[in-house]
C-alpha cells in the first residue's frame, strides 16, 4: 500500500471521501485567524536543522500541529495570491516555478502530521485530523479554482512550445494545466457553479453510501445461539465469535461481515446451510429494500458522475478520470482487462471441476455454489500446499530479512549501503532510522522503519514521505515504511511469515521509488505518480524476495544459520499459484463492473443496479455462477466512496507492469548492477517527470505485455 502525500495542490488520498466545497474567501479568512497562534517556538516554524531536514520529533508536541497547519494554509494562500495577482506578465519562472515554491510550511507540517496520525495516533491528534482534513480539501480547491492563477498557467501552457523548456519543465507545465482543467478551471462561471453543485451532491451521496453500507454490513453479521452450526471453526474462532456477540450485548455467537463477497470463515464451516446463510447475508447486505439499501444511491451517483464528465468535456466519467493515468483512456483499461478474462475464467473453471470432484468423492450430492468454494478449496490447499508456519518462521527473523534480504537486494541491484542512525529523533521508540548511501558512498536518503503492531497504528502496511526530494528546493528524500508485524516478547527474535517478508520488500520498493527520486520539481518527485503506476515499483521489488540468490542469502535459521531446506522453499513457491483462477476472476469481475458503471454516457437513464450488474457481467464474459465479483455493485466501497471510481483496474495494471519488468530482468541476466542501474536511471528516479507510458516503453523497448502476469499467477503454462 502507499499513501500519497501533498504537494502544492494535489489532493489525492487526504481528500478521499471528503470533498467539501468552501469558498476561497471563507477558507483563507478562517486559516488566517487560526494561524495567529503560530509562533517562533513552534518546531515547524523554520525548516528543520537536523540532517536531511528530518522532523525534530523530540521537540514536536501534539499541540504544535494545528497552529502550524493553519498557518501553513494561510501562508500558501498568501503566496498563491501574490503569484495570481502579479501585474508582471506570466513567465515559466514567475508562475509555474513560483508555485513549486509555495506551501513549504504546510508540506513540512502535514508530512509529519500524516505520519503520526497513521502510525502513532491518539484522541488529540484524531481531533485535529477530523478538523483539518476537510479544510485542507477546501484549501486545495481554492487554489485550483483561482481564475486569475489559471489564466496565467494557461497563458504559459498555450505558448509552451515556443519557450524551449527542458523536458521536465515542459512536462510540469502540461501536468499543472491538466490538473487545473481536470478540476474545472476552464469552465465558464455558470458551469463552475453547476460543477460545484454536482460536487456537493456527489460528496453527500458518497457519505450516504458509506453510512448505509456501514449499517448494512453491521446488520449483515451472522448470529446464532446454537454453537453446533459453527462446527469446523477452531476454539479461538468460536471464542472470538462469542466475544463479538457480547460486544453487541447479544446472546450466543456472532460472525461480523467482511468487506468482500467471500467471508473467511466459509473456509472452515462444515455445515452447508450455515455457509449459504452467511454468503447470502454478504451478497444481499445492502439490498434489503430498507433504510440501508444503497441501490438508489449508486444509481444516482453513476448518473451524476456522467453529468459531471459531460460538463467537463468528456464522453463519460472514466474518460475524464483516466486522462492523467498511464492507461489514459477507459478503452485501454478495458482492452487490458478483457484480454485477461479467457485465461482467468478457464483456470477458474478447472478449479471448479476439481472442487466438484472433491464434493462428489465425499458423496456431497450437490453442485458447487459460491458458498462452497472456500470450504473445498481449503481442503485442496491443505492436501497440496499446506505450509506449517512454525516450520517456516524460524528462517525469517526480521533483522536478518532486513539486512541480508531487503538491503542485500538493494545493494546487489543498485549498490546501496545502509547505516543505522541512533541520533535522529523518532516519534516512537520502536522506530529505527537508517542513512542510505549511494554506490559512490554519497548520502542518498534517510529511511525509517516502524514494523511492529500497536493499538494506535492503522492496520496494514504503507510507505510515505517526510521530506520530498527536490533539486529546486535542495532537499534529499526522507521516507518511511510502516507495517503491523507481531512484536516479540523482550529478548525474543521477531519471526515473520513469508507474507510479512513480502510486505517488507513491497514497502521498501515504494521506499526506493522515493529515495531514488532525482527531479527538479517537488510536485513531480518520487512516488507522486498515477494510481495505475504507483504500485509498480513496490510490487516489482517483491519479486526479489523469492529470487534464489536473495532468498538463499536471507532465509536462514535464526539459531543455526542453516539455509531453508529446498522442499520447504519449493512449497512456498508452489503455494503462490493456488486458487488463482478464482482469485483473479473475482478481481476482474469487480474491475469490469467499475468500468461499466463509469463509462455510462450521460444520456443513459437511471440504472437498475441488479439488472445492470447481471448484464455487465454477461457482456464481459464474467457471469460465472461459482465466482461472484469480489465486491457487488451495492457494496463496492472503493468505487462509490473511496476515490477508486474508474480506478479499480489499476491494481491489476500495476501488476502487469511489475511482472513484465521482472521478466525483463530474468531475460537480461537477472540481478545485476547494470540492470538495476538502468532501471533506476530510466524509471525509479524519474517520478512523474514524463509521460508514464513513454517512460515504460523506453525502458522496456516496447509496450508492456500481460503474458508474464499470466505466467506468474499460474494462469498459463505450468
Ligand atoms: Zn503498495
Image (cartoon, rainbow, N blue to C red):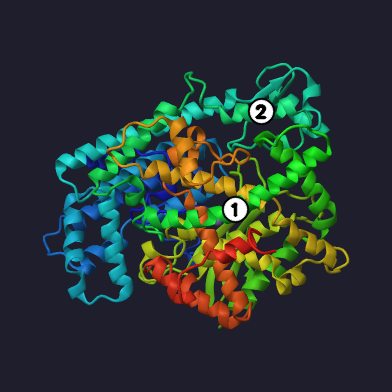
Q: Residues within 10 Å of mark 1 (few under 14, many from 20)?
A: many
Instruction: Say which of marks 1 and 2 sits in front.
Output: 1
x and y, in percent, of residue 193 in the image: 20, 38
Quadrant of the drawing holding the C terminus: bottom right
**Secondary structure beneath label 1:** helix
Q: Residues within 10 Å of mark 2 (few under 14, many from 20)?
A: many
Mark 1 or mark 2: whose residue is earlier in sequence: 2
**Secondary structure beneath label 2:** helix
Q: Residue furthest right?
A: 560
Disc 1 from disc 2: Cα separation: 26 Å
> Quadrant of residue 497 in the image?
bottom right
x and y, in percent, of residue 378 in the image: 76, 43
x and y, in percent, of residue 492 in the image: 82, 54
Ligand 1 falls in quadrant: bottom right
Residue drawn at x 53%, y 25% as measured from the top left: 215
| In the depicted structure, whether residue 128 falls above or below residue 557 | above
Side of 396 where 301 appears, left or right: left
| In the depicted structure, whether residue 73 falls above or below residue 17 | below
User: Between 628 and 635, which is closer to the camera in this rendering?
Assistant: 628
Side of 112 where 300 appears, left or right: left
Residue at the spot of label 2: 278
x and y, in percent, of residue 99 in the image: 28, 60
Residue at the spot of label 1: 344
In the rendered image, is residue 422 in sight? no
Residue drawn at x 68%, y 28% as measured from the top left: 276
> Quadrant of residue 662 in the image?
bottom right
Amino acid at each position: 500500500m502507499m499513501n500519497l502525500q501533498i504537494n502544492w495542490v494535489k489532493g489525492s488520498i487526504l481528500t478521499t471521501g471528503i470533498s467539501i466545497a468552501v469558498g476561497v474567501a471563507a477558507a483563507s479568512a478562517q486559516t488566517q485567524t487560526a494561524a495567529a497562534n503560530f509562533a517562533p517556538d513552534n518546531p515547524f516554524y523554520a525548516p528543520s536543522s537536523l540532517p536531511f531536514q528530518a522532523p525534530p520529533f523530540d521537540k514536536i508536541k501534539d499541540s504544535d500541529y494545528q497552529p502550524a497547519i493553519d498557518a501553513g494554509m494561510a501562508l500558501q494562500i498568501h503566496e498563491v495570491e501574490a503569484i495570481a495577482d502579479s501585474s508582471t506578465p506570466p513567465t515559466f519562472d514567475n508562475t509555474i516555478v513560483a508555485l513549486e515554491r509555495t506551501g513549504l510550511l504546510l508540506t513540512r507540517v502535514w508530512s509529519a502530521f500524516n505520519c503520526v496520525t497513521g502510525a502513532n495516533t491518539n484522541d488529540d491528534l484524531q481531533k485535529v485530523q477530523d478538523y483539518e482534513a476537510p479544510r485542507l480539501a477546501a484549501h486545495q480547491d481554492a487554489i485550483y479554482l483561482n481564475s486569475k492563477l489559471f489564466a496565467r498557467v494557461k497563458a504559459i501552457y498555450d505558448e509552451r512550445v515556443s519557450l524551449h523548456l527542458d523536458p521536465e519543465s515542459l512536462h510540469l507545465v502540461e501536468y499543472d494545466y491538466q490538473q487545473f482543467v481536470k478540476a474545472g478551471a476552464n469552465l465558464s462561471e455558470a458551469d463552475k457553479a453547476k460543477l460545484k453543485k454536482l460536487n456537493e451532491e456527489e460528496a453527500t451521496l458518497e457519505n450516504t453510501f458509506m453510512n448505509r453500507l456501514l449499517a448494512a454490513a453491521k446488520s449483515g453479521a451472522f448470529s446464532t445461539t446454537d454453537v453446533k452450526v459453527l462446527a469446523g471453526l477452531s476454539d479461538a474462532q468460536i471464542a472470538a465469535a462469542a466475544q463479538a456477540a457480547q460486544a453487541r450485548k447479544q446472546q450466543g455467537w456472532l460472525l461480523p461481515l467482511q468487506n468482500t463477497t467471500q467471508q473467511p470463515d466459509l473456509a472452515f464451516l462444515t455445515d452447508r446451510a450455515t455457509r449459504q446463510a452467511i454468503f447470502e447475508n454478504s451478497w444481499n447486505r445492502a439490498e434489503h429494500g430498507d433504510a440501508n439499501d444503497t441501490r438508489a444511491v449508486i444509481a444516482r451517483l453513476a448518473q451524476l458522475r456522467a453529468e459531471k464528465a459531460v460538463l467537463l468535456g468528456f464522453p463519460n466519467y472514466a474518460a475524464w478520470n483516466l486522462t492523467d493515468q498511464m492507461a489514459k483512456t477507459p478503452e485501454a483499461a478495458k482492452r487490458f482487462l478483457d484480454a485477461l478474462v479467457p485465461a482467468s475464467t478457464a483456470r477458474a473453471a478447472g478449479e471448479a471441476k476439481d472442487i466438484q470432484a472433491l464434493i462428489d468423492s465425499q458423496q456431497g450430492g450437490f453442485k458447487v455454489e459460491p458458498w462452497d468454494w472456500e470450504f473445498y478449496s481449503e481442503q485442496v490447499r491443505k492436501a497440496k500446499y499446506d505450509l506449517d508456519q512454525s516450520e517456516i518462521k524460524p528462517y525469517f527473523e526480521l533483522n536478518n530479512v532486513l539486512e541480508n534480504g531487503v538491503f542485500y537486494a538493494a545493494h546487489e541491484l543498485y549498490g546501496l549501503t545502509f547505516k543505522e542512525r541512533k541520533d535522529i529523533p523518532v516519534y516512537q521508540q520502536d522506530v529505527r532510522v537508517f542513512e542510505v548511501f549511494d554506490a559512490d558512498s554519497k548520502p542518498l536518503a534517510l529511511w525509517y522503519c516502524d514494523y511492529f503492531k500497536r493499538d494506535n497504528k492503522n492496520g496494514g502496511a504503507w510507505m510515505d514521505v517526510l521530506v520530498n526530494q527536490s533539486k529546486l528546493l535542495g532537499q534529499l528524500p526522507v521516507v518511511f515504511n510502516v507495517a503491523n508485524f507481531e512484536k516479540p516478547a523482550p529478548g525474543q527474535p521477531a519471526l515473520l511469515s513469508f507474507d510479512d517478508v513480502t510486505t517488507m520488500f513491497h514497502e521498501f520498493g515504494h521506499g526506493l521509488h522515493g529515495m531514488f527520486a532525482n527531479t527538479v520539481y517537488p510536485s513531480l518527485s518520487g512516488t507522486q505518480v498515477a494510481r495505475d503506476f504507483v504500485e509498480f515499483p513496490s510490487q516489482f521489488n517483491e519479486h526479489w524476495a523469492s529470487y534464489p540468490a536473495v532468498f538463499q542469502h536471507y532465509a536462514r535459521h535464526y539459531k543455526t544459520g542453516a539455509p531453508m531446506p529446498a522442499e520447504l522453499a519449493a512449497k512456498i513457491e508452489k503455494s503462490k499459484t493456488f486458487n488463482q483462477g478464482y482469485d483473479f476472476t473475482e478481481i476482474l469481475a469487480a474491475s469490469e463492473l467499475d468500468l461499466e458503471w463509469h463509462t455510462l454516457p450521460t444520456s443513459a437513464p437511471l440504472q437498475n443496479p441488479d439488472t445492470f450488474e447481471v448484464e455487465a457481467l454477461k457482456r464481459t464474459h464474467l457471469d460465472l455462477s461459482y465466482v461472484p465479483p469480489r465486491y457487488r455493485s451495492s457494496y463496492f466501497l472503493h468505487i462509490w466512496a473511496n476515490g477508486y471510481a474508474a480506478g479499480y483496474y489499476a491494481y491489476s495494471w500495476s501488476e502487469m507492469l511489475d511482472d513484465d519488468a521482472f521478466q525483463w530482468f530474468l531475460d537480461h541476466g537477472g540481478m545485476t548492477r547494470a540492470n538495476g542501474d538502468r532501471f533506476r536511471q530510466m524509471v525509479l528516479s524519474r517520478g512523474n517527470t514524463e509521460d508514464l507510458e513513454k517512460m515504460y516503453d523506453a525502458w522496456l523497448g516496447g509496450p508492456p505485455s500481460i503474458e508474464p502476469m499470466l505466467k506468474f499467477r499460474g494462469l498459463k503454462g505450468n
